[in-house]
Amino acid sequence: MFRDEFYMRRCLQLARRGAGQVSPNPMVGAVLVCDGCIIGEGYHRRCGEAHAEVNAINAVKDDSLLSRSTLYVSLEPCSHYGKTPPCAELIIRKNIPRVVVGCLDPFEKVSGRGVRMLRSAGIEVVTGILEQECKDLNRFFMFAQIRKTPYVILKWAQSADGYIDRKRDEREPAETFSSPVTATLVHKLRSEVDAICVGTGTARLDNPLLNVRRWSGKSPLRIVFDRQRVLPAYLKLFTDGLPTRVLTEVEAENFGNVQFWKSDVKKLSLESWLKILFEHGIQSLLVEGGASLLQSFINEGCWNEARVEVSEKRIRDGVAAPLLSGFPSHIQSFDETKICCFLNKR
């Protein structure tokens, strides 16, 4: 068991290299071991490209070793034809006698079928090795596949006395509570999620870009709640060429980089909007503001994580920070970045 866990930890290390590149697929790592030596490694590098198992097998220089090797893989091998052929079929064809799996794949076209296919071919399959760690790595994917709604992360920075901004108009700059380090971490997080969301007030007041600048990686799809279609067309979200989607309740015509996703139901619940986002392929959503939208997600219970940065700065008055039910309004920071992370089991 210790040996299996050792190699599974290597699978997890490899899998993390695909962060921000493989969605809507999960991050997966694979290791091939023969006679106590690693003879091949691989991970899923990019959506649509070869899976981890394929890359690990292709890394083996002597194919004759495969017939007496163990394949370790952090997620159940696929058993269906998608953008690539089934990995389970490749494993069978290569005569690999033993496969160790971190966790099963909840995707309905796999969901245990990969393991059954391997066992039916006479391959020894061990499952559940570092299972929780493997699930946690792909928490966005796992949650979305099971619940059919995106995994939601709320994020804001606030003053030590509980405000996220001064009261101001769009001509005045926003109050800054983030440090260069924590601002970089925010951009890293942006690169790892499918979409980023703000409300009408934040879009108009801050005129944000909502892209990735302080980190390498792709920018998330930008989403704006504008139920009554009141935002002006000159905003950066509408003019910089990057894709933006507007959630609205009124008729609106697409233009440039902007598409409108309309609901015919007035005052649709956030949970219903999230299901619409899932139908459009969004598995993870970062909500960055403003206070009203963040509080709505909290009040409706539509969130999985909240990342709150608490500055030492005090401004004595302004826009009150959102309140997490069951947590103190004046938060004590947990680490040197002064970022607190709260989890909501929904």
Image (spheres, helix red, strand yellow):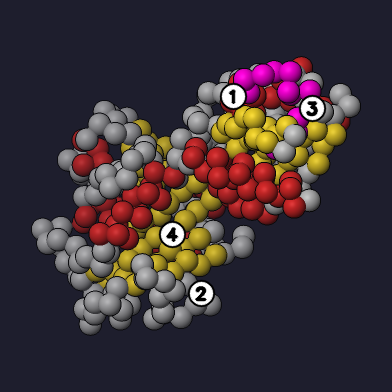
Gap between marks 3 and 4 measured at Cα: 48 Å
User: Which numbered disc flags the more N-terminal residue, 3 or 1?
Assistant: 1
Q: CA distance from mark 2 to mark 3?
A: 55 Å
Q: Residue at x 20, y 70 (%)?
A: 167
Name the foreground residue: 206 vs 26.
26
Give the image location of residue 281, x and y in percent: 52, 35
Considering depth in this image, is 57 or 38 the residue closer to the camera?
38
On the picture, is 296 further left or further right than 56?
A: left
Pinpoint residue 22: horizontal percent, then vertical percent: 50, 34
Residue 70 among magenta residues: yes
Region rendered in magenta? 60-72
Callout 2: helix, strand or loop? Answer: loop
Query: For residue 68, which numbered disc appears in the image?
Result: 3
Residue 267 position, x and y percent, is: 46, 53
Image vertical order of residue 302 relative to residue 309, above or below: above
Name the kind of residue labelled 2 in the image: Ser
Q: Residue at x 20, y 66 (%)?
A: 175
Residue 61 or 260: which is nearer the viewer? Answer: 61
Residue 59 is tagged as 1
Which amino acid type is marked by label 1? Ala
Circle 1: is it few (<14), some (14-19), or many (20+) Cα within 10 Å?
some
The circle drawn on residue 325 is 2
The CA distance from mark 3 to mark 1 is 16 Å
Q: Residue furthest left?
A: 171
- Please give the label number shown on residue 154: 4
Between the residue at mark 1 and the residue at mark 4, the CA separation in whole angstroms equals 40 Å
